[in-house]
Image (cartoon, rainbow, N blue to C red):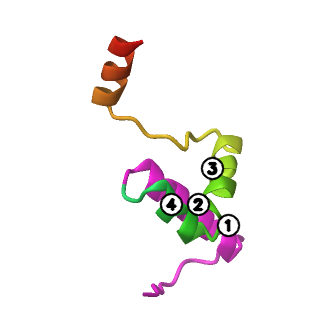
């Protein structure tokens, strides 16, 4: 499925726009790491490295997961 929409003139390449979109979708919990990497046209490993370079964690934990891990530490 392709999506098409008009944007105001932006000085940004399509690949960068796809990367930014995929990062935001991942941060919002809308897509998984694998799906975000696919949207951005990267392997999961390469996408995770890009995330780390940009200061975004590729791992997502819920508060419940963090509490559980802290109790088991």
The spot of residue 38 in percent (x, y) is 55, 69
- Secondary structure at numbered mark 2: helix
- Secondary structure at numbered mark 4: helix
Q: Which residue is mark 3?
A: 48
The spot of residue 3 in percent (x, y) is 45, 84
Tag nearer the camera, 4 or 2? 4
What's the mark number on residue 34? 4
Mark found first going from the N terminus, 4 or 2: 2
Quarter occupied by the C terminus? top left
- The local crowd at label 4, few if under 14, some if 14 to 19, many if 20 or more residues have their Cα within 10 Å, is some
The residues colored magenta run 1-29
Please tell me whether residue 19 belongs to the stretch shown in magenta.
yes
The spot of residue 48 in percent (x, y) is 62, 49
Spatial CA distance of label 3 from label 4 is: 9 Å
Residues under numbered marks 3 and 4 in contact, where contact means CB atoms less than 8 Å apart: no
What's the mark number on residue 1? none
Residues under numbered marks 2 and 1 in contact, where contact means CB atoms less than 8 Å apart: yes
Mark found first going from the N terminus, 1 or 4: 1
Spatial CA distance of label 1 from label 4 is: 18 Å
């Amino acid at each position: 499925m392709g999506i098409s929409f008009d944007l105001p003139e932006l000085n940004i390449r399509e690949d960068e726009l796809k990367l930014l979109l995929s990062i935001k979708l991942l941060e919002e919990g809308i897509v998984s790491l694998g799906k975000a990497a696919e949207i951005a046209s990267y392997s999961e490993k390469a996408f995770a490295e890009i995330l780390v370079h940009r200061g975004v964690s590729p791992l997502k934990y819920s508060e419940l997961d963090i509490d559980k891990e802290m109790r088991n530490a």
